[in-house]
Amino acid sequence: MSRWEPDAPERLERAALELFVAHGFDGVTVPQIAERAGLTTRTFFRHFADKREVLFAGEDVIPNRVAELMALAPDGAPPLELIAGGFEAMAPMFEGRVDQLRQRRAVIAGHDGLREREMRKRADLCDSITAGFVARGVDELDAKLLAETTGTIFRVGLDRWMDSPERGLVTVLRETMSALIAVTEGSRQPSSAER
Amino acid sequence: MSRWEPDAPERLERAALELFVAHGFDGVTVPQIAERAGLTTRTFFRHFADKREVLFAGEDVIPNRVAELMALAPDGAPPLELIAGGFEAMAPMFEGRVDQLRQRRAVIAGHDGLREREMRKRADLCDSITAGFVARGVDELDAKLLAETTGTIFRVGLDRWMDSPERGLVTVLRETMSALIAVTEGSRQPSSAER
């Protein structure tokens, strides 16, 4: 069995998502997931604490990676350039996984407890980005607004990309960011017809 | 007892919040709330379906009021002017209630189930605002981004106002909106040092 270990997490994730989509999250057990993946429950528990973690383990690393990226960015980088750079650095974690991400989205949308977990994760990520900006000398209010805006662009962009992945996640995120800047700017210059 | 009816909801809310803050949401029963308010449990249930509704009944009307306001706004009003007008129209629902809102915030922050409910309410409001903009001819993406941005400004602004209410909610919301526009604009003109 050990020769299968290297891709065990991916196989377990794939099996779990297929089962969750077919039977609902609550209708699936860990032995069923392991069986479909051709692995033992013991192997399952070597990689995931429980079946919920199959949906969140990959995502839980994001706040730390974001914190690292923000600490490494050059001094004086304008905030939204930094955010755009962060999107580029994060995109490979998502690209190539569109089928799993779509399944994951459907499973979470249909389950209150999972939505709660997802929203809490979102709030944690927002706190992490806020702290990153404050550490870079941005004032608390601006840091919070930048973090919320980053979250908005990422969530809206990721959703759009899942619906038409052929254009590439980075492109879609960039477009989404431009759209957000345009709608907020537009409101400041009501007479302008540039859009 | 009936002569007390007109202010029963307010008295029940005040009593509930005090008890929730003191004993935690799960440590308080409806009879205790009614007793502290000097009312019967029967009166309680005439106004609220359960103790959780004391925290959410007032807020549940918001998506409908927002939808009404958006439908009534003049054609061609720039989106963020419309949002600013909406904030002004909604502010009286919050001003004068800062003590209750602070207590409510503390109770919700300390309880996972209540946070879930609060976040769902937030998502519903966002959907309602998105639909309002789409009905006004704004494209789907811009509508979604405007709705999320409205939510960000409102939540961040309301939090700041609760910490220093003397400046007035409308003023704080206006400042928060300007700060959001400035941080996103600033990123587009990295060479500008206007901030």
Image: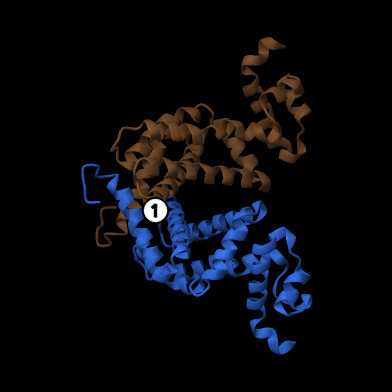
Chain colours: A brown, B blue
Asked if residue B101 shows in the view, the reply is: yes
B30 relative to B95 in the view: left or right: right
Location of residue A132 in the rendering, given as x and y in whole percent from the top left corner = 41, 40
Task: Answer above or below: position of A92 versus A113.
Answer: above
Toward which corner of the image does residue A22 lie, by quadrant?
top right
Residue at the location (69% across, 60% down)?
B25
Instruction: State which quadrant residue B191 falls in.
Output: top left
Q: Residue at x 56, y 34 (%)?
A: A59
> Which residue is at a point 47% across and 71% down the rendered structure image?
B90
Q: Position of residue A74 (x, y in %)?
A: 31, 32
Residue A106 picture quarter? top right
Label 1 Cα neighbours within 10 Å, binned few <14 / some 14-19 / many ≥20:
some
The relative height of residue B147 versus residue A172 in the rendered view (above or below) is: below
Residue closer to the observer: B180 or B167: B167
Of residue B75 and residue B28, the one placed in the foreground of this image is B28
Specify whether residue B86 is in view.
no
Q: Is residue A171 left or right of residue A46?
A: left
Q: Which is more toward the observer, B37 or B173?
A: B37
Left or right, B194 with respect to B150, comes to left
Quarter of the image where the N terminus of chain B is located: bottom right
Expressed as whole percent of the image width and height from the top left, the position of residue A84 reads 36, 37
Callout 1 secondary element: helix
Q: Which chain does the residue under circle 1 lie in?
A: A
Pointer 1 residue = A141
Which x, y percent locates residue A177?
37, 44
Q: Residue furthest top?
A: A3
Type of the residue with mark 1: Leu
